[in-house]
């Protein structure tokens, strides 16, 4: 009897259920009752064949596995006509004495590097894709311990595998809990790179967990508690500011939005000190609206559950801070995170209400659907006054304009510093989570400031929504180097152009790894 059974190809897709239906099983196939969580598997890479008539080439680790089984792996690759195309692969069962399953996944062209047109290091990204698809396919086979070939980029292999096997199990019954396999590096000396990759992936997975939680399970108070639980054991200082403190500090714009909900607002101040205490910190401000219905400017009901992720900017900041501590970055970083809900009620702010900001300027809140800039305005001003930062960055899911422009392909960046923009651009090209700069011109500034009855409006005039929101925030950062990341297209549910090592229709946790890489470049410029 042939050992070949139900040959199918692993597609370049991210939805985990597709892998279970598409995985190739070669060898003795176990029934569901036989699959145990203590089985071991390995993921190895396969380079694209360069010329017609030549065979695809296994990575050095794959060649060692093939040698151990006396060439059987190469024979099966030839029989199943694997050609090394990126993300295409097979699972071979019961051919190796150490591993019950061997996943062979295509890496594309060998030696590929930075693509200037794509602004992406394709070699690194290909490794993330191959490692992620291989690890997820073995996970769906019930493999409980997965070893991953470093494929010349151990850090990126760790990122892809750890992001791919992550699940959100918090609301499942015990009997329905998914199997989360253990991951380890196989046959590579780059243990430090693997550890860095695991730290970065864990940071993004933390952001995914916070963002994906239902709104009733991640209120401002519960988000603050989750932040304390995640960061305080790492030696990071977390100050939780409650309503009395917020009122005493006269953060009136924040309170204008928060008063529509019965959930009390919270302000978080998070500090990581990795350098000398007198060194100025980098200030991050994360939008923390834990549910954004649009208040009296109610958003459409269809798809409104996605807006539980309106605090994904805050979640990315929390994940970034944990990675800073795990990597021991020699830099001082501070986060200010305003947390509240934006809901309709008799106490809600009304369209057209005017509030006085900390800097003395007045802002008209003409559209409650655009509450993000209102909530962040006082937080930006407070953070600058309190910490005197060397640069300011804010992260928020603000406007549909950037989502319509980029889809899920890139995070929109607005900055008054060319140097800071180039640092973020480079960070995105290395992490595979790209960013792209949008204009911050006087043209847009005039559309948010040229008013007779007040100094600023929260929505401006015109249809360039993302540029107008950035112009409002820029008015609140008069002197410092500043960058605004609009993650409306990348930080919420993954829907379009799915990244293979993320999960469809779940929160992405982006751009956490890009933010971590940016801080690494700022902390260690000589090691870039």
Image (cartoon, helix red, strand yellow):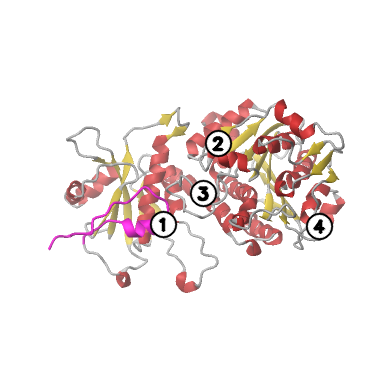
SS at mark 3?
A: helix
- Toward which corner of the image does residue 97 lie, by quadrant? bottom left
Q: How far apart in space, not on screen, are marks 4 and 1 (Cα)?
A: 42 Å
SS at mark 1?
A: helix
Q: How far apart in space, not on screen, are marks 1 and 2 (Cα)?
A: 26 Å
Numbered mark located on residue 16 in the image:
1
Describe residue 28's horizontal placement relative to residue 162 as left or right.
left
Residue at (49% x, 45% y) in the render: 196
Judge whether 38 appears above or below 411 on screen.
below
- Within-10-Å neighbours for mark 1: few <14, some 14–19, many 20+: many
Where does the magenta region start and end? 1-27
Does label 4 or label 3 sit earlier along the sequence? 3
Q: What residue is disc 2 on?
A: 435
Residue at (17% x, 35% y) in the render: 53
Q: Quadrant of the N terminus?
A: bottom left
Q: What residue is disc 3 on?
A: 199
**Foreground of the two, 517 or 308:** 308
Residue at (65% x, 38% y) in the render: 466
- Within-10-Å neighbours for mark 4: few <14, some 14–19, many 20+: few
CB-based contact (under 8 Å), mark 1 and mark 2: no
Q: Nearer the viewer, mark 4 or mark 2?
A: 2
Does label 1 or label 2 sit earlier along the sequence? 1
Does label 4 or label 1 sit earlier along the sequence? 1
């Amino acid at each position: 009897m042939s050992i070949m059974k139900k040959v199918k190809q692993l597609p370049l897709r991210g939805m985990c259920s597709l892998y279970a239906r598409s995985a190739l099983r070669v060898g003795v196939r176990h029934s569901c009752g036989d699959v145990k969580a203590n089985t071991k598997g390995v993921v190895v890479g396969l380079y694209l064949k360069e010329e017609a008539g030549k065979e695809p080439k296994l990575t050095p680790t794959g060649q060692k596995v093939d040698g151990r089984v006396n060439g059987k792996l190469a024979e099966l690759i030839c029989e199943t006509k694997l050609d090394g195309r990126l993300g295409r692969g097979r699972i071979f069962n019961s051919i190796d004495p150490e591993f019950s399953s061997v996943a062979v996944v295509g890496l594309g062209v060998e030696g590929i590097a930075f693509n200037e047109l794509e602004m992406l290091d394709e070699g690194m990204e290909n490794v993330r894709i191959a490692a992620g698809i291989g690890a997820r396919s073995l996970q769906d086979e019930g493999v409980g311990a997965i070893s991953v070939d470093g494929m010349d980029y151990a850090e990126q292999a760790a990122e892809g595998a750890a992001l791919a096997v992550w699940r959100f199990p918090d609301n499942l019954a015990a009997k329905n809990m998914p199997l989360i396999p253990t991951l380890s590096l196989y046959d590579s000396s780059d243990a430090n790179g693997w550890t860095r990759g695991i730290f970065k992936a864990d940071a993004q997975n933390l952001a995914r967990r916070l963002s994906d939680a239902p709104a009733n399970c991640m209120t401002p108070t519960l988000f603050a508690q989750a932040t304390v639980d995640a960061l305080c054991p790492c030696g990071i200082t977390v100050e939780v500011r409650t309503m009395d403190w917020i009122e005493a500090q006269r953060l009136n714009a924040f309170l204008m939005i928060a008063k529509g909900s019965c959930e009390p607002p919270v302000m978080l101040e998070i500090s990581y000190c990795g350098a000398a205490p007198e060194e100025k910190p980098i200030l991050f401000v994360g939008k923390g609206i834990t549910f954004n219905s649009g208040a009296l400017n109610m958003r459409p009901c269809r798809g409104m559950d996605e807006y539980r992720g309106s605090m994904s900017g805050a979640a990315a900041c929390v994940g970034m801070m944990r990675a800073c501590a795990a990597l021991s970055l020699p830099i001082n970083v501070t986060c200010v995170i305003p947390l509240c809900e934006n809901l309709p009620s008799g106490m809600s702010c009304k369209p057209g209400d005017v509030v006085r900001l900390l800097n003395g300027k007045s802002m008209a809140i003409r559209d409650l659907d655009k509450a993000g800039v209102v909530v962040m305005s006082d937080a930006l001003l407070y953070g600058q006054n309190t910490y005197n930062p060397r640069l300011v960055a804010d992260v928020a899911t603000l406007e549909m304009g950037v989502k319509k422009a980029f889809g899920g392909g890139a995070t929109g960046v607005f900055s008054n510093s060319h140097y800071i923009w180039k640092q973020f651009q480079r960070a995105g090209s290395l992490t595979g989570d790209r960013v792209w700069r949008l204009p911050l011109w006087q043209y847009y500034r005039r559309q948010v400031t040229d008013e007779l009855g007040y100094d600023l409006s929260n929505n401006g005039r015109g249809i360039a929504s993302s540029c107008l929101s950035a112009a409002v925030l820029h008015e609140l950062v008069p002197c410092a180097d500043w960058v605004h990341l609009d993650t409306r297209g990348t930080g919420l549910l993954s829907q379009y152009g799915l990244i293979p090592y993320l999960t469809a229709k779940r929160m992405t946790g982006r751009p956490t790894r890009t933010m971590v890489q940016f801080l690494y470049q700022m902390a260690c410029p000589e090691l870039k």
